[in-house]
Image (cartoon, coloured by chain):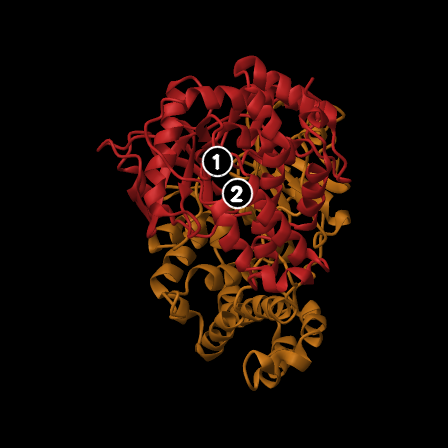
Chain colours: A red, B orange
């Protein structure tokens, strides 16, 4: 739930004067997204999304994100595309925050993903990877192996408050992942946060991907590993191999994976689980009084991490 | 900010099957309203609002509220009107909550109301009062004099935590208001919560009123008194008599007020200030950990209450 920066009708009208999209007919804060303030903006020309970028997004990264969305949309991917102002710019300032208007994407995200969602997801992820190959800008993944150490250091001393023994378990995991992390898998632009709330569907047809504000350059297979964590576990923490198989098969039809990529999946999936575990752990231990976002339970990702640690190979994900 | 009850795409699709408004094209929680869960629902036939009624709304009151909206819309007032399902019903159940779909109202609410908003506001309020005169259902105002005692009793012991001496001041105020509260002013349906976030404008043209979930039968002039509190004070707590004059003059052009109503305004305005003060005080003293709504500062209404207590007569509101 997120509207951190209120925008007055006067400020909105002044902001819209810099665009050629008409005037506001409706304007409502959207109770979604935990990083930025998002508004549904209906003008007399149609629906749009207005985003104000809040503290967690580094302003210097915004051209990468907005440029990527425009690049992917031009390559035919269904995703929001930034609207250019009269001066050509897509990024400006509103209420003291960097802000941009993007096109509106229809569809509804699946609260409880079913197997029917997973093949379209895999296909869209692969298409995104292919479409991003010639995106010229570059952004390091701040939340990959190197970043995990710093993140863990901020929670290590109190990690056992969440589960006894957790600090030791994570320290060992971090050590092993750092030592065995691959160095030579195919790279490209990854979404890095492709959870169900970032994938819209029109019934079972995928209508688009949103929220590219964690996108970066990294192993493409790491994005698959994130989706294995985000889409293929049931609420009771059991792994649904049918979902994984559907997703991976659909992905590989669009972008075939090398044997090295497939072999690396269990390790990458452990890393992805650790990455979300560490940010959740930090948010859990550093809850802000009066914050409007309830932190997510880190235990969910401890279970996922342990699952991936125990698998014998990529066959566990339905790959044959 | 409010989405207390998440609704899955499957649950939504099943719910929409009971209506003839098409299927969901977009569905987004709205970060507005503190009582209910509101969703923007775009179907292939156009925009709607889906509301799930949460704990604070008594289910037995919903037919009064929904019936009122339909009544007022039929009388030509710009307000959301409930959509009837295939079976004719406007109220049904979704995710275990009472739920209804209403028509979508365009416009933007004014974050910082200006004098230009106040005449249209007064006119719309009077039109609502006139249109409601023949609404046959009746609902007592639970938050009028009798209700204040019970509300105050829940906060009295801790009121001085907010401001030293507050408990005594409020006890005396309550005593005086109870003793002097009028018994014979013109009654009808009042909105009872017509704050700026419940009034939409298309630039300076009022496009409609929303959120009738506090509506009840009471003195019509009490609704005016609420608007004096909600619209005519500046952020520094000073009273803007220009706004009050514009609002009252526009109101009286549509529905002339009796001398008794005007004379009662200072007392009614004290009562209205006390009413919002008491609910804010309660919410302030009973903050829920992890709640997604930040309680509003009760001190704002102490200042307003003191202003109304000090005025000599309705002339203080610009009435000549």
Q: Does the image show residue A43?
A: no
In the depicted structure, whether residue B151 falls above or below residue A118: below
Q: Which mark is residue B308?
A: none
Provide residue B185's location: percent of width, then percent of height.
Answer: 60, 63
Q: How many marks?
A: 2
- The front one of B235 and A267 is A267
In the depicted structure, whether residue A67 falls above or below residue B203: above
Secondary structure category for the residue under label 1:
loop
- The reply to the same-chain question for discs 1 and 2 is yes
Mark 1: few, some, or many residues within 10 Å (few <14, many ≥20)? many
- What chain does mark 2 sit on? A
Q: Which residue is mark 1?
A: A211
**Which residue appears farthest toward the left when viewing the image?**
A87
Provide residue A73's location: percent of width, then percent of height.
Answer: 40, 22
Give the quarter of the image for residue A237.
top right
Q: Which residue is mark 2?
A: A33
- What chain does mark 1 sit on? A
Q: Are dots 1 and 2 in contact, CB under 8 Å? A: yes
- The front one of A152 and B237 is A152
- Specify whether A205 is left or right of B237: right
Kindly identify the residue that appears in the image at 34 percent across and 62 percent down: B242
- The front one of A92 and A16 is A92
Kindly identify the residue that appears in the image at 38 percent across and 48 percent down: A58
Give the quarter of the image for residue B52.
top right
Kindly identify the residue that appears in the image at 41 percent across and 67 percent down: B317
- The front one of B223 and A221 is A221
Provide residue B222's location: percent of width, then percent of height.
Answer: 56, 62
In the depicted structure, whether residue A49 falls above or below residue B139: above
Provide residue A303's location: percent of width, then percent of height.
Answer: 72, 44
Quadrant including the C terminus of chain B: bottom left
Kindly identify the residue that appears in the image at 36 percent across and 26 percent down: A70
**Which residue appears farthest toward the top when viewing the image?**
A253
């Amino acid at each position: 739930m997120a509207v951190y920066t209120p925008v007055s009708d006067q400020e909105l009208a002044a902001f819209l004067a810099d665009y050629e999209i008409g005037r506001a007919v409706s304007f409502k804060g959207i109770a979604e997204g935990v990083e930025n303030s998002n508004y549904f903006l209906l003008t007399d020309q149609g629906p749009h999304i207005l985003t104000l970028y809040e503290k967690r997004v580094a302003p210097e990264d915004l051209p990468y994100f907005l440029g990527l969305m425009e690049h992917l949309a031009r390559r035919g991917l269904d995703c929001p595309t930034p609207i250019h102002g009269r001066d050509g710019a897509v990024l400006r300032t509103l209420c003291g925050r960097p802000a941009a208007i993007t096109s509106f994407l229809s569809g509804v995200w699946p609260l409880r993903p079913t197997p029917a969602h997973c093949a379209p997801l895999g296909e869209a992820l692969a298409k995104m990877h292919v479409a991003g190959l010639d995106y010229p800008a570059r952004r390091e993944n701040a939340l990959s192996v190197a970043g995990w150490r710093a993140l863990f250091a901020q929670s290590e001393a109190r990690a056992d408050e969440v589960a006894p023994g957790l600090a030791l378990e994570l320290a060992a995991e971090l050590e092993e992942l750092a030592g065995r992390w691959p160095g030579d898998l195919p790279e490209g632009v990854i979404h890095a946060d492709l959870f169900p709330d970032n994938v819209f569907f029109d019934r079972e047809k995928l209508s688009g991907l949103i929220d590219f504000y964690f996108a970066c350059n990294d192993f493409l297979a790491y994005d698959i590993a994130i989706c294995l964590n985000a889409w293929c576990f049931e609420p009771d923490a059991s792994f649904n191999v049918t979902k994984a198989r559907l997703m991976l098969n659909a992905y590989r039809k669009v972008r075939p994976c090398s044997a090295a990529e497939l072999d690396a999946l269990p390790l990458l999936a452990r890393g992805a689980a650790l990455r979300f575990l560490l940010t959740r752990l930090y948010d859990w231990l550093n809850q802000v009084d009066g914050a409007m976002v309830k932190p997510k339970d880190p235990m969910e990702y401890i279970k996922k991490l342990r699952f991936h640690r125990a698998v014998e190979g990529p066959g566990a994900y339905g790959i044959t």
